[in-house]
Image: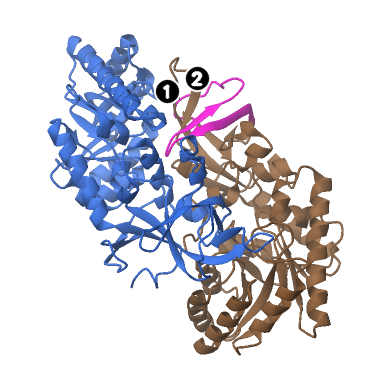
Chain colours: A brown, B blue
């Protein structure tokens, strides 16, 4: 099978490019003497995880309980579930842990004293044990104990002491605001804010005689541009594996570093003149409706269109996306025939890849050398 | 199992509400003496299809070849594939048709003379036969022979005569621009534009001595508000089954008519004050990033938040959506505890439901009475 025959839309993954990206991040963090705990929320594939883990300690981050189940079943047993836990979800994690066996090391995150108490009690009732990282808000304004709020940080830690099923292991944060930075200097500054917040929290816990072995940062932009990671024990970037137009705009990758593309067919030329746009069979479902790149490059729309060999069409992008129709426009329309194929670089690879059950793997060329299944849902 | 125990996020479908919606559309089109060929692109479920087909002739519309395969395998054999065909895709349709047997009636759509020729030739080479509807552009500016362009219409029809594998059956259009109408009068006007375009094309073909048994319109708004459907033989609405916030804004349904909701858990309260938003475990993947309702109601964000009994929280909506986090804000934040559950009405149910593999079916209450699988992908 090759890209000229594969049904469209299909999700293509370039293995060579992926390996360059995973090796680069591994090398980058080794220089900082910081462990890499890749976030599998983007890739959701054991084959991708194996590449990302090469040369690293073997722990991962996940964003759903389904990912935890999938990766544990595939032999990865050191897993941080990186979305705030609620007690009811421990039952499912305990069930997975029971199946994987005693060497499973599952960590959960939380930021609230009451939840800490309830999680400790629930874990004990289940007869399970979990490691806990306290989530910090280092400026992303999403979740976490705000950096500087020592009272709340220590109250969360105290909550964990009230049940026997959990062990405080440290602190974590995700500098999500790095996605809105314009330029390297801004990202460097957010990376330092992330590091400083983590170190503040580790110091707070240490001063109170509490353990803090794990000091965990996140985000691809901060992992790429951090100048100093002193005091940080691990980083949890995810989208660096695949890149996307958004990451290209932020500056963490080049266009050639984008690993996944959507293979689509030209199914028409439309508009009143019959020549106002090229109609593709990749629309809102095949690409997602993420417009995250608008902030940087409104013309990127729902994805940038390239030919099957990844050559540019000079600014052609999917400017409108209906459920199964993508309308490609640009400064000029290339002479593409109906039935010809194109490849679309996604705006946000985490969301685009989520629409597919598998990757069709190439190694630079048109030949599909493997099919990698991926998990999804919850 | 009930809504208090189900893992979150999950997709909930209210069967009673669905049945009201499907019966209403069936009755509405019967009054016009127009056949209903429901579009299954939203529901992608045989159980939903059975309800939508009750009292109707049994034909459906699909948006992907995978839907065609799924519904054919489940016994539905009169299927219009409602996205412009390219010759290479006939191979897959022929394969399905071969499995279903001789009574399978697959129709494809196209709008281009060259494609008509190539499709006719490819069908003949495959030894298959397909019915063809010529797609018209009645104002949506997406695909189709522009209404009024008799030369192109007849050229497409002529292309079909050049191979033995296809039979011209008629014309079809989708008044997608009805989604941007404000108010009933505007939709009535688009519905008339859709009808008039179809009738023009049917007359053109008739005058040339060509067959046009099928005169097929589309879109939920035009099916709901059309005053006159004279000359139209069938309508292909889809989203009317489920409704969504977008359809509520357009006026085709009320909030209580929305059939599908996303069950989510409160996982935190966030922001610098720890009280600026309610954090839900339904984010960009659980809801989709469709912002289609912005044009009508920017506060709707990525979905409107209700309690488990579908009672309003007075304007609470998901105003920001990260991959697995939804940030709910509103005029005031309700006193929801971490771990409590809410239900989110989707902005665009076609895209939200696509993120799930199954519906958890309720009948008004909290009890899950059935689980209906759905298909997805391509």
Residue in the foreground of this view, choosing between A157 and B203: A157
Q: Is residue A152 left or right of residue A284?
A: right
| Residue A357 visible in the displayed image | no
Q: CA distance from mark 1 to mark 2?
A: 9 Å
Secondary structure type for disc 2:
loop
Q: Residue at x 50, y 38 (%)?
A: B294
Q: Residues within 10 Å of mark 2 (few under 14, many from 20)?
A: some
Residue extent of the magenta highlight: A312-340
The reply to whether callout 1 and callout 2 are in contact (CB within 8 Å) is: yes
Counting from the top left corner in percent of width and height, residue A129 is at 59, 85
Q: Is residue A216 left or right of residue A316?
A: right
Compared with B256, A59 (above or below) is below
Give the labeled residue for mark 2. Answer: A276
In the picture, the quarter occupied by the N terminus of chain B is bottom left
Counting from the top left corner in percent of width and height, residue A199 is at 82, 69
Give the labeled residue for mark 1. Answer: B141
Counting from the top left corner in percent of width and height, residue A134 is at 68, 73
């Amino acid at each position: 099978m090759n890209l000229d025959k594969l049904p469209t839309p299909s999700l293509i993954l370039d293995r060579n490019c992926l390996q360059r990206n995973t090796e680069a991040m591994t090398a980058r963090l080794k220089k900082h003497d910081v462990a890499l705990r890749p976030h599998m929320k983007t890739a959701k594939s054991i084959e991708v995880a194996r590449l990302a883990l090469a040369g690293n300690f073997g722990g991962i981050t996940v964003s759903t309980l389904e990912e935890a189940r999938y990766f544990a079943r595939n032999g990865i047993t050191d897993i941080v579930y990186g979305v705030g836990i609620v007690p009811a979800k421990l039952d499912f994690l305990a069930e997975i842990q029971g199946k994987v066996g005693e060497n499973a090391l599952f960590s959960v995150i939380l930021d609230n004293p009451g939840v800490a108490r309830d999680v400790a009690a629930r874990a004990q009732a289940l007869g399970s044990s979990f490691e806990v990282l306290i989530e910090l808000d280092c400026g992303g304004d999403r979740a976490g104990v705000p950096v500087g709020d020592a009272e709340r940080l220590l109250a969360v830690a105290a909550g964990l002491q009230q049940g026997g099923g959990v062990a405080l292991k440290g602190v974590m944060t995700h500098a999500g605001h790095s996605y809105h930075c314009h330029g390297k200097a801004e990202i460097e500054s957010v990376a330092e804010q992330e590091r400083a917040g983590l170190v503040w929290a580790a110091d707070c816990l240490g001063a109170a005689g509490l353990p803090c072995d794990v000091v965990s940062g996140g985000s691809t932009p901060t992992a790429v541009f951090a100048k100093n990671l002193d005091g940080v024990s691990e980083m949890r970037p995810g989208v660096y594996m695949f890149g996307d137009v958004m990451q290209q705009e932020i500056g963490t990758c080049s266009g050639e570093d984008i690993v996944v593309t959507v293979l689509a067919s030209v199914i028409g030329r439309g508009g009143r003149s019959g020549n106002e746009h090229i109609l593709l069979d990749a629309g809102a479902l095949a690409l997602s409706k993420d417009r995250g790149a608008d902030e940087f490059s409104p013309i990127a729309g729902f994805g940038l269109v390239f030919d099957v060999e990844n050559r540019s069409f000079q600014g052609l992008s999917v400017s409108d996306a209906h459920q199964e129709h993508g309308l490609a426009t640009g400064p000029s329309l290339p002479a593409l025939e109906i039935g010809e194929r194109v490849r679309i670089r996604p705006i946000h690879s985490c969301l685009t890849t989520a629409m597919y059950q598998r990757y069709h793997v190439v190694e630079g060329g048109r030949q599909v050398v493997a099919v990698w299944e991926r998990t999804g849902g919850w």
